[in-house]
Image: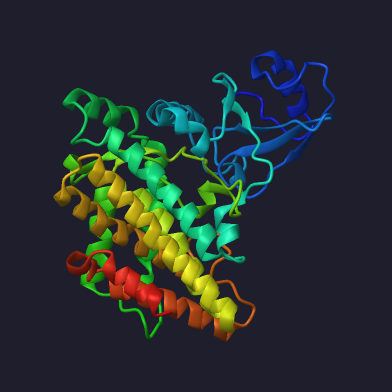
Amino acid sequence: MSAEILTKDTVTAYVAGHASDIGQFPADAALTAEAIQGGNVNFAFCVKSACGKSVFVKQAPEYVAVFGPDGLPLTSTRIQKEVAILNEWREILGDEADVFLPKLYFFDDDSKVFVMEFLEGFDLLDHHLVSSPTVAVDTSIAAQLGRFMAKTHLATHSSKVSTERAESLTKDYENRALRDIQLEFVFTKAYKEVSNVTSKEFKVDDAFLAEISALKSRYNGETGEKNFSLCHGDLHPGSVMVKPGEENQGVRVIDPEFTVYGPPGLDVGSLLSGYILAAVHQSFDKEGDAKTTAVAALTEGVVACWETYRATLCEGGLSEELVKEIEVESVGFAVAEVCRTALGHAGIRLWLQFDDAKVKEAAVDRALSIVQKCIIARHERGIDVLFECLKSL
């Protein structure tokens, strides 16, 4: 039998009933709740006590939340994967875990609910990237994320763990239900009618579609098993919370329910896609010095993320050959996501959204031109071709 679905009106009683397990406020605390909007798959709430202490509550129903119970079915066991990888990461990161991850207070497997730290004062990274990024702040944030990815990828890399451990990770994080969603909505649906797209900057041909097909196979675990890591699986900037600033800066990685044991470049590319899209957006949204500052900050963010990631992998003993493979696939996954977003298949995103139709068309064309320049050239030029595109904005 499915668990009772929490609502804004019932979640406070649920939290009060588990107060001793959660350990953040007494059972008789006066609590209020607000639903958190923006997610598609789950239900989420902020529950706050009268003394000001808050927690984040998330529940996974047996369906995609945004479609309702009669819509798209989806196993609620996805939340078990999210809790499992959070625990894996904490073990890997050790003393650095609280630098990158919110604290998990309580998990109720029967109700498919967890309660974790509410990140007061944080904002989604994708919101920050389209506001007022600066070189000092955004290179720091990006470098931290590069370090996080490298440390977690290294510790689980198929060349670094035993055969038994790699087989266990492959099985435990196959995550077929959510992987199939990504295969359809990220790597298939956007390209079914892509030949109908009219853009002077974008050419769809067999070579382009072959690149997308290869990335799809790689994501599905069909190729390159000697270069796999435990991945977040959906590490776009909407899965990162940040507290910007040159002092007391914070970075937290959230929502890893799409986790897979697969290509490390998936995470790197997903993250970098947001920086690319934000850079294109800023190049049309701002003018003069403000434009120059924002685009430079985002471009340098991409460089800082990759250079930190690469250096950490090399310091950890990953071979140059494997690192180069990750570099090439990172660019591929990045521009595939840029393409999907530009074509309008990534849901409601802040990037490339303009009231002026001509400005929007020009921004989409610019994004697609980056896709066109990188999708094949990456095999010879690696990430340098992406750096060049960003520096020309």
Q: Nearer the viewer, residue 237 or 365?
A: 237
Q: Residue at x 40, y 82 (%)?
A: 199
- Where residue 343 appears, x then y in whole percent? 45, 69
Residue 74 visible in the shown view:
yes
**Residue at image coords 70%, 22%:** 24
> Which residue lies at the image location 16% right of the left edge and 50% below the top edge?
320
Above or below for 34 versus 196: above
> In the rendered image, which quarter is residue 333 located in?
bottom left
Q: Based on the displayed image, in which of its 4 quarters is residue 359 positioned? A: bottom right
Q: Which quarter of the figure is the C terminus placed in? A: bottom left
Residue 3 horizontal side relative to residue 264, left or right: right
Residue 175 pos. (x, y %)? 37, 35
Q: Residue furthest top?
A: 20
Q: Quadrant of residue 176?
A: top left
Q: Report the side of 309 relative to 121 (left or right).
A: left
Q: How is the image coloured?
A: rainbow
